[in-house]
Amino acid sequence: MTATATSARSDLSELGRSETALRTFLHGLPGVDQVGAEQRAAQLGTRSIKTTAKAQAIDLAIRMVDLTTLEGADTPGKVRALATKALRPDPADPSCPHVGAVCVYPAMVPYVAEVLRGSGAGSGRPSGGPGQADGAAPAGLGIVHLASVATAFPSGQAPLDVKLADTRAAVAAGADEIDMVINRGAFLAGRYQEVYDEIVATKEACGDAHLKVILETGELATYDNVRRASWLAMLAGGDFIKTSTGKVPVAATMPVTLVMLEAVRDFRAATGRQVGVKPAGGIKTSKDAIKYLVMVNETVGPDWLDPDWFRFGASSLLNDLLMQRTKLTTGVYSGPDYFTLD
Amino acid sequence: MSERVAVRKTYKLFIGGKFPRSESGRSYIVQSGGEETANVALASRKDARDAVVAARAAVKGWAGATAYNRGQILYRVAEMLEGRRDQFIALGASADEVDAAIDRWVWYAGWSDKLPQVYGGANPVAGPYFNLSAPEPTGVVAVVAPEAPALLGLVSVIAPAIVTGNTVVVAASPAAPLAAVALAEVLATSDLPGGVVNILTGRLSDTVPTLAAHMDVNAIDLTGVTDADLAAELEVKAAENLKRVLRPAPVGHDWFADPGVTRMTVLLETKTVWHPKGV
Amino acid sequence: MFEYAPAPESRSVVDIKPSYGLFVDGTFVDPVDGGSFKSINPASEEVLAEIAEAGNEDVDRAVRAARKAYEKVWGPMPGRDRAKYLFRIARLIQERSRELAVLESLDNGKPIKESRDVDVPLVAAHFFYYAGWADKLPYAGFGPDPKPLGVAAQVIPWNFPLLMLAWKIAPALAAGNTVVLKPAETTPLTALLFAEICQQADLPAGVVNIVTGAGDTGRALVEHPGVDKVAFTGSTEVGKAIARAVAGTRKKLTLELGGKAANIVFDDAPVDQAVEGIVNGIFFNQGHVCCAGSRLLVQESVADRVLESLKRRMAQLRVGDPLDKNTDIGAINSAAQLAKIRELSEVGAAEGAERWSPACELPDRGFWFAPTIFTGVTQAHRIAREEIFGPVLSVLTFRTPAEAVEKANNTPYGLSAGIWTDKGSRILWLADRLRAGVVWANTFNKFDPTSPFGGYKESGYGREGGRHGLEAYLNV
C-alpha cells in the first residue's frame, strides 16, 4: 500500500528518472479486486436520482460533455455544426447550458476554432483551470473548450517526433486541450519509462493547453493495469486521465472509471495536485451519465463535480440529456425530432 | 518343579500417551478373566481435567496431520490389534467381536481421506465466486463408551471420532475397563500421537459430569449412558458451551452392523470458504 | 454539492390489515385467550398492526395441525409433488417481491435497497433451491431412503425476518416435514404475508403453521412434546436455554446463534475493496447480522491508512428513511435493541476506546444509531468480546498472520471471518486456521442457498443452506 490515502504529501517527482523506481512504485500500488470493484460500481448505479437532483445532474452533465466527432468522414461543415451545437445545445431553451468542449481531429481544429472564437469562446486557455492546485475558479469559465486528439490517435503507433508535431500543430491551430493516447504496447511490455517520457514530452509540446491522457483501458485488460496507468499518467504530468479512444471494442465502464477516480483521489492526497477524469465512449443515456455523477460524488466528492475536473467524451449522450431535460421542464416525454442531430 | 508365578498387570489410565495412576491414588477391583482380579484406576475429576488438557494439546498436531497420515495410523492400530487377538479373547471378548473390532479400524482408516470428499465440495453459488465447503474436526470430544460389547463398542466410538482429526477423552465402561486399558496399550504402540486418545477408567459419576460441563470440550458422545435421567442431566450440562451431542445408543443397538457416517459427521464442523473469481 | 432528492419507494403496494390472527391448519384463526401485541414501524414508531399472541393452547393446536398434515398429506406425498408446491411458492415470492420488500422494510427498519436487492431475491432463490431437492433426497448422500423427522418447531429472529423463514421452511418442507414457525415479535408481518402466499399456492392445510408471539410462545413451541425437530436462529443465550430444554428428548436440534467475527485486513489488501468489505461487513442491515464483521483486525503497518479510508467512506453512508431508495442504513429494529447498542457503546467509551462517527443527522422519531467505530480497542474490551448487533465496529491491530489468527479465534463464537490480502497462499493458510463456519476471503457477507452457513463453538451447530442444510431435517 504505497502513498495512497495518506495525508502526508510526498514528492514523487523523482520516480520518473528511473525505470526501476517507476516499476517499484507502480507495482507497489494496492491491487484491485475485480469482483469487488465491479460490485461497488454496480451499487452506485442503483442510486435513485429524482426531481431536483435529476435536474441538477442533467445540467451538470451537459456542461461536462466533450462533444466529440472523430470520424474519417468529418468535414469542416460537420464540425462547424457540432461547434454551434456545443454553444447552444437547445436552441429552444436559452437556459440550457453549453457543453464543456468540442473534441475533434487536429485537421478539424481551425473550423471549430472559427465558430467558438466568433462566439467569444474558444482557443487559448487562460491561466487557471485543471492542473492548478489552488482550485481557484478558472478565468475561462463559461466558455466552450476546444479539444483535439493528437499523438497519432487512436493507435499511437507513430514515431515520437511525429506525435509531438501532431500535438504542436493542434495547439497552434487553436486547441486548448489535447487528448493524447499512451503507448499501450510499451505499457503492457513493462516499458514504463518509455510511456512516461512520451507523456512528459507531449505535455511539454502542449504548452498552455491542457493534456488529457487516454489510457485506452479496454486494451489494458485488468484493473490493476488501469490503476498503474492512471498513476503513470499523473506522475508524468497529465492534467486529465481519460478512459478510451472510442475506437476499440471496450470503452468507458463504470468500474474502470471508479478505479481511475480512486487513483486521482489518492494522487491528490499524496501530492496535493488534482487531476481530472474523463470517461469516453459508450455513455449514451442520461441514466448512464447520472450514474457516473453519483460515482464521482461518492468516490471523490464535490471537488470533482465540475467540468474542469470531470468530462464525458460522448456524442449521442447530449441529445438524450436534452430530451430528459425537456421532460423535466415540460412534464411530457420528448422525441428525437425536437433536437438537432449535429 | 513348581508352577511359574505369573506376572500380573497393573491397569492404569491412559492420558497424553502415558499410563499414569489416578492422581487420587484410588482404584477398584474387577475380575480379569479366570479367577484373577485386577486393580483398575478409579479416575477422579482432576484426572478428567488432565485428560482434557492432554486432548486439547494434541488437537493441533492431529487435526493438522494429513488425512493420509491419519489413515495410515488407524490402519496401524488394526495391525497391532490383529497381533493381540488372543489377549482380547482372554479378556472375555468373542473371536467374532475381536475380528469385527479389527475390521472396524480398517474401515474407518479408509475414511480419513474420503469423508471430506463425500461430505464437502464445491457449491455453485449464483455469482463470480469460488465456494468450497469442507469438514473439519470439532476439537476435543468426550466419549462415554458402551458397556458391551466391550471392545467392539469402544472401537466403534473412538475410531469415528479420531479419524477426522478430533481427539477424545473416553470414559470406559466401569464394568468393562480391561478391554479399554488393553486397547490403550494397542494405541500406544500404533504411532498414534500422545493425547489423541485418552482413556479414563472408574465411575462415570466421577468423570463424565466434569467432562460434560468442561468449557474446553467441544462435543460429547453419550453412547454408553444407559440411565435416561443421567443422559438428560449431562446434555443440560453440555448446553453451557453448546457442545455437539450424540445421544445414547438405543437399547439393543447392533454393534456389528454397518455403522454409517453419522458418528463421524456429528463431530465435524463444515467450513465454507468464499473467494471472488477475477483477473 | 450534489444533493439527492428524496426517492421514497411507494408503500401503497402493501395492504396491511389492522389485525392478524394465527395461521393454523391453513386458515387465520383468533388465539384462544384473545391476547395480542402490536408491531410497529421502527423508523416512525407508528403501529402497523395488531398481532395475535399464541398461548400454549394455540401452539398445541398448531402442532397438532402440523402432525395431522405430516401423517395424512405431506409425509405420504411424492417428492415431485412437494417440489412443485415449493416451486410455486418461489414463483409467488418473485411475483410479489415488491410487496414483500416494502413490508419487510416497514416492519424491520432495513433499507429498501437491501430488502429489495438482497433479502427477497435470496428468499425466492432459497425456495427454488430446496424445491429441487424434494424429489432427489436419495441422492443427497444420506443413504438410499432418508426419512423426514416429522413436525419441525422453528423460531426465527427479527434481523432477516423473511429470509430466516425461508432458511427454515424451505429445507424442512423439501425433506417432507411439516412446520410450526414462530417469527420474532417485532417483525411478524412478512411471515403472515408468507402464510397468505401458502394459501395462494394451495399448499395443503397444516403443512405450514405460523404462530406469532414473544418468548413464551417460543418456549411453548420448543418444549411441546409433539415436535420432532427444533431449529432456532437467535442469541446464544436463548440457544443455550433451548439446548437445555430439548435435553433428554428425541428432538433433533440445530442452532444458528451469535458471532463476533474478525475481519482481517493485511498490508497487501486490495484496499478500496477491503474498505467496502469492512463497511458491508458491519453496516449491512444496521449491523443486525449474526455474522457481521464486528471486529476489524488490521495490520498495524497500514492501520492509519485503512482507517482514514474507512472514515472517508463512512461519511458517504446515508442514514434515514428505510423506504428511501438511497438509504444505506435504516432504523434500529426496536427500542430494546437500541438501548443495548447504546449501553455497549458507552461501555466502549468508558473502557477507553476512542469513538468516532461521521456527521449525520438522525430523524427525531424512531430508533436510530449512527454508524460508529471504536479505535484503540484490545481483546480485553467488552466491545471486542460481546456481540453488539448494531452498526458499531471495534478496531484492533495485529502484526503477524499468526497473531491475527490467534486474536480472531480468541472468542467463544465461531460463525464467520473475513480475510483481505492479495496473497493466495496466505488466504488458504488462514482459512485453515480460522475457527469459523464461513470464511469470506476478499469479500464479506455473501450468501447463497447452495452455500452452507453455520457456526463453530458457541455460534451454534448444524448448517443451513446447500446439501448440508437437508441433514437438519432428515432422520440421519
Image (cartoon, coloured by chain):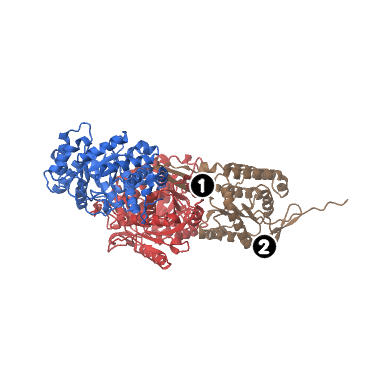
Chain colours: A blue, B brown, C red
Looking at this view, name the residue that lies furthest to the right. Answer: B1
Mark 2 belongs to chain: B
Q: Position of residue B196 (x, y in %)?
A: 61, 52
Q: Determine whether A52 is above or below A342 in the image.
A: below
Disc 1 designates what residue?
B135
A293 displayed left or right of C63:
left
- Three-letter amino acid code at the position of disc 1: Pro
Looking at this view, name the residue that lies furthest to the bottom. Answer: C350
B203 displayed left or right of A300:
right
Disc 2 designates what residue?
B23
Q: Quadrant of the C terminus of chain B?
A: top left
- The one nearer the camera, A319 or A9, is A9
C264 displayed left or right of C197:
right
Q: Element under label 2?
A: loop
A62 displayed left or right of C376:
left
Q: What is the spatial separation of the Cα atoms under label 1 and label 2, in whole angstroms?
A: 37 Å
Q: Quadrant of residue A238?
A: top left
The crowd level at tag 1 (other Cα within 10 Å; few <14, some 14-19, many 20+) is many
- The one nearer the camera, C371 or A278, is A278
Residue C298 shows up from this direction:
no
The mark nearer the N terminus, 1 or 2, is 2
Residue B263 shows up from this direction:
yes
The label shown at residue A171 is none
Q: Position of residue A251 (x, y in %)?
A: 29, 39
Q: Position of residue C70 (x, y in %)?
A: 43, 48
- Three-letter amino acid code at the position of disc 2: Glu
Q: Exactly how many numbered labels are in the figure?
A: 2
Q: Position of residue C133 (x, y in %)?
A: 43, 42
